Amino acid sequence: MLVIYDPTHLLHNPTTELYDGVATPSPETPDRIETIKKSLEELLQLCWKNPDNFSDEEALTLHSKPYIEYLRESSSRLVKGQECVTSNFIHDTYAPISNGTWAAARSALNTALTGAQSLLQGDDNAVYVLCRPPGHHAGDAYMGGYCFFNNAGAAANYLSAHGRVAILDIDYHHGNGTQQLFYERSDVLYVSIHANPANQYPYTNGFEAETGLGKGLGFNKNIVVEKYCGWDIYSHAFTEALEAVTQFKPDYLVVSLGFDGYKDDPIAGFGLSIENFGQISSEIKKLGLPTLLVQEGGYCIEALGDLAKEIVENLS
Ligand code: Q9C
Ligand code: ZN
C-alpha cells in the first residue's frame, strides 16, 4: 500500500472550540496524524510519498469563490495565538481558524488529490491519504466539524472524470458536506453509516429519508445506527452499505475513514474494537476495487496507530 503524507498539516494546531458557547480544548490535534504515521512506519510493506502541488483551479473546484477567499484572508490576517470561530461560512462552532489553517487545509487537498492520481496511474490498488484537517463536514461554502475543504470529495470528483466513484463514509458522524456536494449527481454514489443525527452531531443532516435530488435521486444512502450500538448491529449496517456500493458497480472506491467509532473514542463511539476495524477492512478488500482511504475523524490518540495498522494489514 502507498501512503501519502505531508507535514504541512502541523501548521493547523487549534487549541479551543466553542462547545455550547464555552471554550473547550479541541480534540482535532496534530498528534492524531503523527501517531498514525509513527505506527505505520513500522510496517515494511508500505511505500511513502509526499504530495504533488495541485493548482487552486484543480484543487478547489467544489468550493465557492467567496468561501475560498474568506478562508485564505482570515487565515492570513490572524497572528500567532489568535483563533476565530465565527463567520458567514461556518455551520457550527467547531472549526477554529488560525494562521496556519489555510496552508494545512490546502495541503490536505494536495494529499488527497495525489492519492487519487496515484490510484489512477495504478501505482497501487490501495492508497492511504494520511491527511488533516479532515474534510467530510465541509460543503461548497462552509466549514464545520473540524473540516475546511472536502478532501475525500475532491478526490472522488477527480476520479469521476475517469469512471464511476462510490464514497463509503465510515466516520462516526454523518458527512453532511460530502452529501451536499454530490446530492444532485448520479456519477458519484455517497453511502454513509453514522450515529443518529436526531441526537448526535451534525444534527441537521444524515437522516435515511435523504436519498438525493434530481439526477442524484437514489445515489445518496444514509444508514443510521445508535451511539455504542456494538458490532452485531454495526456489522449489519455495514453489510447493507457494501451491498449499495456493489449494486452501483463503481470503478473506484473512496473511503472516508474515521476511527471515531472506536469504543474508547473520547467524543463518539459505536463500541467497535480494533479487531472490528480489521473486519471492516477485509470486507472492503473483498470488493476488489481500486481503493483510496482518506483520513477523517478519530480522537482516541492511544489507539489510532493500532487502528490504522489494522486497516492497512487487512487491506494489503
Ligand atoms: N457534542 C469529525 O469527526 N463536536 N468531526 C460536536 C457535540 C464536533 C467531528 C460536539 C464533532 C465533529 C471529522
Ligand atoms: Zn467524525
Image (cartoon, grey):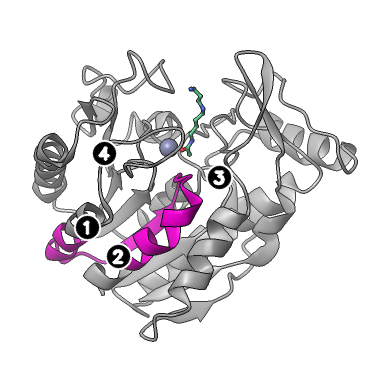
Tell me which segment is drawn in magenta.
281-310
Q: Which residue is mark 1?
A: 275
Residue annotated with mark 3: 61
Local secondary structure at mark 1:
helix
Dot 4 beta carbon under 8 Å from ligand 2:
no
Is 107 situated left or right of 202 in this image?
Answer: right
* Foreground of the two, 277 or 266: 266
Tell me the CA gap for discs 1 and 3: 38 Å
Q: Position of residue 250 (x, y in %)?
A: 20, 54
- Residue 238 location in percent, x, y? 15, 42
Amino acid type at mark 2? Glu
Q: Which of the marked residues, 3 or 2, is nearer the chain's N terminus?
A: 3
Q: Amino acid at mark 3?
A: Thr
The residue identified by callout 4 is 271
Q: Quadrant of the N terminus?
A: bottom left
The disc, 2 or 1, on the residue closer to the chain's N-terminal end is 1
Question: Magenta span has 284?
Answer: yes
Q: Which mark is residue 131?
A: none
Q: Give the Cα separation between the discs numbered 3 and 2.
A: 33 Å
Amino acid carrying label 1: it is Glu
User: What is the distance, in whole Å, between disc 2 and disc 1 at their CAs?
Assistant: 7 Å
> Eyeballing the image, is 161 above or below 180?
below
**Alpha-carbon neighbours of circle 3 within 10 Å: few (<14), some, or many (≥20)?**
few
To which quarter of the image does residue 90 belong?
A: top right
Which sits in the foreground, 102 or 122?
Answer: 102
Determine the residue positioned at 22% across, 34% down: 219
- Where is 72 relative to 304, above or below? above
Contact (CB < 8 A) between labels 2 and 1? Answer: yes
Q: Which mark is residue 310?
A: 2
Q: Is residue 78 highlighted in magenta?
A: no
| Distance between the alpha carbons at the discs numbered 3 and 4 | 37 Å
